[in-house]
Image (spheres, rainbow, N blue to C red):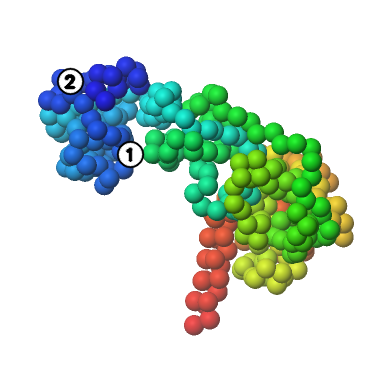
């Protein structure tokens, strides 16, 4: 593509007249740049590396130091918006298919499908850009963010399954469920029955597009992740403690998760551990935290379940550090 065409598509401003007038392909990572490519990014060190690797053009936002006037320098108001415009332009002539699924069904499908059957979008244009550009015709893309899908491909499809239930629940506990699907019985699946409707939608989608899947791969969703915890706030094996952190990143799901816990475990003492400013109108003990490390202040032995609104990886890092510190203190 010529740099003149690029400027028209992304509403960019050419900062000078370069020695070259076109580029081969686009890269957002400087170490992948080859001679003739366009580098997209604003970090000065990355720009320098990209030029050293042979970039013919730099697309950046804000000011940049023009360290080589032989290459093209294209300034845009927003790199993300520029990439979205490039995607929309490229998709005009493509034969790709984009679908929206609610997050729980999206996450379940991501776990059980065989690799390569579909492409799961992260709803981050820098992460998804090359997935889309390099995809083969007829590829299926699934996203869980309607606004993102609308921005890159307004004609995306919201998947609606039938009312038919493909699974029959035969047992439900707080963390495990059992059910039948196509006359096969699945036991002790790490999926609370709260999410069986989401599994049903995922299975409908897989059937509709003749996708290969394995239900046995399923292990919770990132909307509901249990961590069994010792009294010293270290992580234990699944089922190896009477105290459990139930972690979710989704504040919209908090009410449903709390209702589910109270329904299945009516006897339980429950604590809500929420960021400052988050509220749930329930008569349940609640701690609002400013920093997630305040989790170390919880008196774990007073509660059976602590429902936490937080990033799972950040929380596990804190708890793993507790274990390391306790091991060091033994010597």
Give x and y (percent) for residue 89.
40, 23
Residue farthest right in this picture: 266
Task: Identify the mark nearer the N-term, 2 or 1.
Answer: 2
Disc 1 target residue: 28
Measured along the vertical axis of the image, is residue 56 above or below residue 177? above
CB contact under 8 Å: marks 2 and 1: no
271 above or below 162? below
Q: Is residue 138 above or below residue 226?
A: above
Q: In which quarter of the image is residue 246?
A: bottom right
The circle on residue 16 is 2
Residue 273 at x, y = what percent? 69, 51
Residue 77: x and y, percent? Answer: 36, 23
x, y percent for residue 140: 53, 38
In which quadrant of the rendered view does residue 75 lie?
top left
Q: In this view, does 303 lie to the left or right of 311?
A: right
Q: What element carries label 2?
A: loop
């Amino acid at each position: 593509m010529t740099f003149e065409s690029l400027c028209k598509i992304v509403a960019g401003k050419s900062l000078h007249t370069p020695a070259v007038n076109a580029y081969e392909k686009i890269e957002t990572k400087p170490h992948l740049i080859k001679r003739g490519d366009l580098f997209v990014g604003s970090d000065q060190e990355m720009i320098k590396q990209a030029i050293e690797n042979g970039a013919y053009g730099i697309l950046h936002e804000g000011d940049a130091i023009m360290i080589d006037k032989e290459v093209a320098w294209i300034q845009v108001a927003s790199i993300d918006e520029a990439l979205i415009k490039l995607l929309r332009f490229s998709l005009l002539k493509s034969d790709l298919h984009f679908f929206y699924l609610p997050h729980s069904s999206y996450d379940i499908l991501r776990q059980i499908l065989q690799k390569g059957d579909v492409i799961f979008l992260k709803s981050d244009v820098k992460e998804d850009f090359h997935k889309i550009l390099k995809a083969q015709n007829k590829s299926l893309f699934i996203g869980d963010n309607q606004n993102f899908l609308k921005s890159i491909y307004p004609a995306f499809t919201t998947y609606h399954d039938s009312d038919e239930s493909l699974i029959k629940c035969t047992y439900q506990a707080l963390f495990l469920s059992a059910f039948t699907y196509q006359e096969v019985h699945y036991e002790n699946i790490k999926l609370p029955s709260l999410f069986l409707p989401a599994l049903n939608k995922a299975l409908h989608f897989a059937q509709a597009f003749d996708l290969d899947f394995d239900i046995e791969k399923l292990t919770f969703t990132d909307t509901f992740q249990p961590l069994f915890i010792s009294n010293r706030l270290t992580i234990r094996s699944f089922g190896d403690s009477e105290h459990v952190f139930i972690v979710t990143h989704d504040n919209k799901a908090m009410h449903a998760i709390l209702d589910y816990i109270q329904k299945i475990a009516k006897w339980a003492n429950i604590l809500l551990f929420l960021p400052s400013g988050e509220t749930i109108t329930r008569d349940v003990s609640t701690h609002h935290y400013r920093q997630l490390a305040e989790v170390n202040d919880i008196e774990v032995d007073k509660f059976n379940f602590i429902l936490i609104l937080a990033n799972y990886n950040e929380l596990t890092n804190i708890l793993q550090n507790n274990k390391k510190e306790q091991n060091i203190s033994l010597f």
